[in-house]
Image (tube, rainbow, N blue to C red):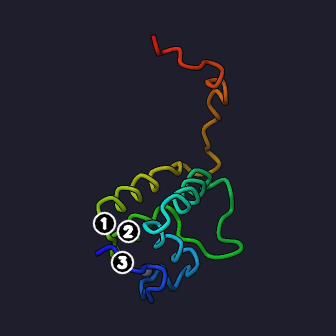
């Protein structure tokens, strides 16, 4: 039964009322995993640095696990794992206490040293 059309589902959860557009995109994670994952990874990784929700309300990463639990998926375990992983990306600390960037781009200059 993989034909659940999430994108047209009239969902009544609080997320749908809070952030309908973002809700629709999160729900479409299973239908369009790559598109959704890229967006969610970007959002999670920059959460606290970039001000989200200015143009449209968004569901914050801290609520993605709850979001996963609140919806029906074709492969619930996999979707749940994805959201758990994504939700763990944002730094826990406040934005002001950000960690300094570590060795930015220095690793790119050493291709396959460990291949011996
Ligand atoms: Zn919903």
Tell me whether circle 2 and circle 1 mark residues in contact (CB < 8 Å).
yes
Picture quarter with ligand 1: bottom left
Q: Secondary structure at mark 3?
A: loop
Numbered label tally = 3
Q: Position of residue 114 (x, y in %)?
A: 48, 15
Q: Secondary structure at mark 2?
A: helix
Question: Badge 3 is on which residue?
Answer: 3
| Viewer-side label of 2, 1 | 1
Marking on residue 99: none
**Residue nearest the viewer, comparing 60 with 6:** 6
Give the CA separation, mark 2 to mark 1.
Answer: 8 Å
Tell me whether circle 1 and circle 3 mark residues in contact (CB < 8 Å).
no
Residue name at image x 56 percent, y 74 percent: 22
Q: Quadrant of the C terminus?
A: top left
Q: Residue furthest top?
A: 116
Q: Secondary structure at mark 1?
A: helix
**Residue nearest the viewer, comparing 83 with 93:** 83
Question: Badge 2 is on which residue?
Answer: 68
Residue name at image x 53 percent, y 66 percent: 60
Give the CA separation, mark 1 to mark 3.
Answer: 14 Å
Q: Is residue 30 left or right of residue 51?
A: left
**Rendered position, 2 above or below 111:** below
Question: Badge 1 is on which residue?
Answer: 76
Give the CA separation, mark 3 to mark 2.
Answer: 18 Å
**Residue nearest the viewer, comparing 40 with 33:** 33
Q: Residue furthest right?
A: 55
């Amino acid at each position: 039964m993989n034909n659940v059309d999430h994108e047209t589902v009239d969902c009544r959860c609080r997320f749908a009322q809070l952030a309908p557009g973002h809700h629709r995109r999160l729900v479409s994670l299973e239908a369009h995993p790559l598109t959704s994952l890229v967006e969610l990874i970007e959002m999670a990784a920059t959460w606290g640095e970039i001000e989200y929700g200015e143009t449209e309300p968004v569901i914050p990463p801290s609520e993605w696990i709850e979001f996963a639990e609140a919806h029906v998926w074709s492969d619930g375990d996999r979707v749940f794992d994805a959201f758990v992983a994504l939700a763990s990306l944002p730094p826990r600390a406040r934005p002001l206490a950000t960690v300094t960037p570590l060795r930015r781009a220095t690793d790119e200059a050493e291709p396959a040293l460990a291949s011996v």
